[in-house]
Amino acid sequence: MTRADELVAAAREAALSAYAPYSGFRVGAAVLAEDGTVFTGANVENASYPVSSCAEATAVAHAASQGMRRIIATAVACIDADSIEGAYPCGRCRQILSEFDTEDVYVTTATGEVRTHTLDELLPHGFKL
Ligand code: THU
């Protein structure tokens, strides 16, 4: 299994734990931290919709709160997306991934199609302090 395959599988698995009763759109994310550990997360919605957390944000919070400071690659699995075009990370999540220097992003749906991008492609000229 390649690194991408492993991360995509972990993201797909994480999506099964999504709490998405309002949208019905389950998302899982898996981030590979600098020490080789994989941290996962899923979207966690809230009755007050804007309070919801995206899968990527959950996974990054999981990694960062365990002391990780650099993410090598991230997989995002939108297992309820109709098409790969509808499976890309939202803008806020791109910014969150950029904070920890994510290089590669693997985007996937339930169908098995995987697209690989650099974060630079997805978030050119992202904000950094
Ligand atoms: N969602 C994510 O988890 N990540 C994204 O990058 C885009 C959207 C979630 C938020 C919400 O729970 C559901 O997908 C539908 O918008």
Image: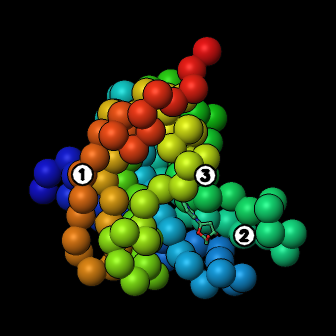
**Residue 118 image offset from top left, x and y in percent:** 30, 39
The answer to which image quadrant residue 81 occupies is bottom left
In the image, 12: left or right of 54? left
Q: Closer to the observer: label 1 or label 3? A: 1
Q: In this view of the protein, can residue 6 be seen by the observer?
A: no
Q: Which residue is mark 1?
A: 116
- Quarter of the figure with the N terminus: bottom left
Task: Please say if 60 is above or below 90.
Answer: above
| Residue at 33% from the left image edge and 40% from the top image edge | 121
Distance, label 1 to label 3, CA atoms, is 21 Å
Label 2, on which residue? 45
Q: Residue furthest left?
A: 1
Regarding residue 42, the answer to whether it shows in the image is yes
Q: Is residue 69 left or right of residue 34?
A: right
Report the mark closest to the observer, 1 or 2: 1
Q: Is mark 3 within 8 Å of ligand 1?
A: yes
- Which label's residue is closer to the chain start, 1 or 2? 2
Q: Amino acid at mark 3?
A: Thr
Task: List x then y, in percent, for residue 84.
Answer: 33, 71
Compare residues 101 and 126 and report the one nearer the observer. Answer: 126
Q: Ligand 1: which quarter?
A: bottom right
Q: Residue at x 69, y 83 (%)?
A: 21
User: Going from the N terminus, do you reach mark 1 or mark 3 first?
Assistant: 3
Q: In terms of image quadrants, where is residue 122? A: top left
Q: Circle 3 sits on which residue?
A: 58
Mark 1, residues whose alpha carbon is within 10 Å: few (<14), some, or many (≥20)?
A: few
Mark 2: few/some/many CA within 10 Å (<14, 14-19, 20+): many
Of helix, strand and loop, which one carries label 3? Answer: helix
Residue type at tag 2: Glu
Q: Name the residue at 61% across, 15% down.
A: 129
